[in-house]
Image (cartoon, grey):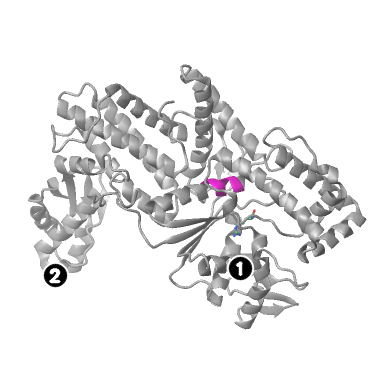
Amino acid sequence: MSAESSPPAVPLAAQAEAAVREAFKAALGEQAAGADPVIRPSEHADYQANGVLALARQLKANPRELAGKVAARLESSELFAQVEASGPGFLNLVFADSALTGQLAERHGDPRLGLGAPKQGRTTVIDYSAPNIAKEMHVGHLRSTIIGDALVRLLTFTGSQVIRQNHVGDWGTQFGMLIEHLLENPDVRGGDEDGDTAAISRLAALYKAARARFDTDEQFQARARQRVVALQSGDPETIAGWQEIVAESKTYFGEIYTKLGVLLTDDDIAGESSYNDELQGIADDLEQRGVAVRSHGALCVFFDDVVDKDDKPVPFIIQKSDGGFGYAATDLATLRHRVRDLKATRLLYVVGSPQALHFKMVFETARRAGYLPDGVEVAHVQFGSVLGADGKPFKSREGETIRLIALLDEAVARAKATIAERSPELEPNAQELRAHEVGIGAAKYADLSTSRTRDYVFDLDRMLSLQGNTGVYLQYAHARIRSLLARAGEAGPAPEGVPAPLEPAERALLLALDEFGDVLKSVDESLEPHRLCAYLYTLAQAFSDFYEACPVAKAPTAGQRRLRTAICELTGDTLALGLSLLGIAAPERL
Ligand code: ARG
């Protein structure tokens, strides 16, 4: 795709900026070099340039007069139909119709919608999902999986080689009791084979039973501790038990990933255990470099700004006094691997906000140790909690973290009811598939459309509402466009030139379409998918205003019909691409 895509269409905002910059220079010569035109969307025009104010201040000139001078220079530009100095020194910019239809012609029908080839030369490692073996995935893992998947798709599109890493928790002392129980009770391997939750029900049963014995039976406790030692020393029987548990968990995670339709596969799993052999080396290296020091037998890193409430420094423990390694050492080995071996230029960790301090210390330690060179960007892409209707972190009535699958299944079941009601003509199989796309899409969209770091309430009614900023609303908007295009039956390139003066609703929609590339760029930089959601919602609303004001099939002239059809097509394609970058299906019919 990248090789064939045409050069990017320069967004109108960027064209306006360049034109104003030129006009600054023409009016003022070198004195204006470097002045920022400050282009903003405007209520009174297509865009507003506010840069005259700062420039006038700098030159000690009268801003209104200066704005008038610059406006006069811009009058002759083909880009604008109208340029007006207003207020204390703003410039109101109204594009020529031909500028808007020209953009449409460049983007329409291009496989990348006129956004040009993806950027080259970046390698981004995205760490996401990362559930823990032998435990259920909880809603926090759901958020990580959904946000991570959207970032994988977005960054791949804007231009990065993306390496997915599922840093599953597959090591630790909890395995002692699990393996011990498994080996002592081979019959727990049974369980019913049917039903897609078989793997997790077996694991949950194992976990529960092992835990119960561990908490009540002291001799079992001692044997479980022995197992941890046996596991760490690579005892074959113990390792075999561990592998069995890991394999079962992977099956369970795979079921959820399939249900969610995310890109993660078994090949993306690089669990904590895969770094075991490097941990001692990391510890020695940090100690040798003086980054870590021994304190009460443990190997620790200290930070001036990480202190407890008595102002005592809180240690970042690399190696415990008993010689064991934990989460910190593993993450340092992981980071080093990603930079050194995977050649990452950008490292993203999609993990909940409670781990902010952990990552701050990982990153800072890595910098001190030289594992994180200057050109490599690193970010903890944090997110808030999912809350229940009561505003408290989402829990089932039993107080356990609610079963993820159950939650998704309920979204799908509700979507099914809506679809059966609205589209009874769809085949039952198609209804089933659509229900899946809508239900899962609703849950993903609800998650992605909230500003990442905020908590949000998991509310199926709101998620599946046909009104408002929801996935379902966008899916319906997209399907409606496809169906009206199918009815119009007219296809072909966007017209050259301007068939008739543009209606305000046409202008507004064309302007909105033109902003797509800038929005993707801002998501790439900010790692905030909700900006794309907000954009798609605005776009769908602009479309609905357009469709109300501007008949398509019954447009006054053939030229306008062609133009409007092309506008519908580009809107449909933009919605479909936008949703796909969020990991959400955009069915043609609903
Ligand atoms: N397994 C961890 C948890 O459930 C998340 C791991 C995140 N990734 C990392 N590199 N630490 O909390």
Q: Position of residue 443 (x, y in %)?
A: 53, 37
Relative to 59, 195 lies left or right: right
Q: Determine if the magenta segment contains residue 283.
A: no
Q: Nearer the viewer, mark 2 or mark 1?
A: 1
- Tell me the chief SS of the magenta region: helix
Q: Mark 1 is on which residue type?
A: Ala
Which quadrant of the structure image shows residue 542? top left
Which of the pair 475/485 is nearer the observer? 485
Total number of numbered labels?
Answer: 2
Cα gap from disc 2 to disc 1, whole angstroms? 52 Å
Q: Which residues are magenta?
A: 141-146
* Mark 2: few/some/many CA within 10 Å (<14, 14-19, 20+): few
Relative to 343, 481 lies left or right: left
| Disc marking residue 208 | none
Queried on whether the Cβ of the residue with tag 2 lies below 8 angstroms from ligand 1, the answer reads: no
Q: Position of residue 11 (x, y in %)?
A: 25, 49
Residue marked by disc 2: 30
Q: Is residue 255 visible?
A: yes
Q: Earlier in the sequence, mark 2 or mark 1?
A: 2
Residue marked by disc 1: 333
Q: Residue at x 60, y 48 (%)?
A: 141
Position of residue 305 relative to residue 251, above or below, is below
Q: Mark 2 is on which residue type?
A: Glu
Q: Secondary structure at mark 1?
A: helix
Q: Determine if the magenta segment contains residue 145.
A: yes
Q: Secondary structure at mark 2?
A: helix
Q: Residue at x 44, y 57 (%)?
A: 161
Relative to 23, 107 lies left or right: right
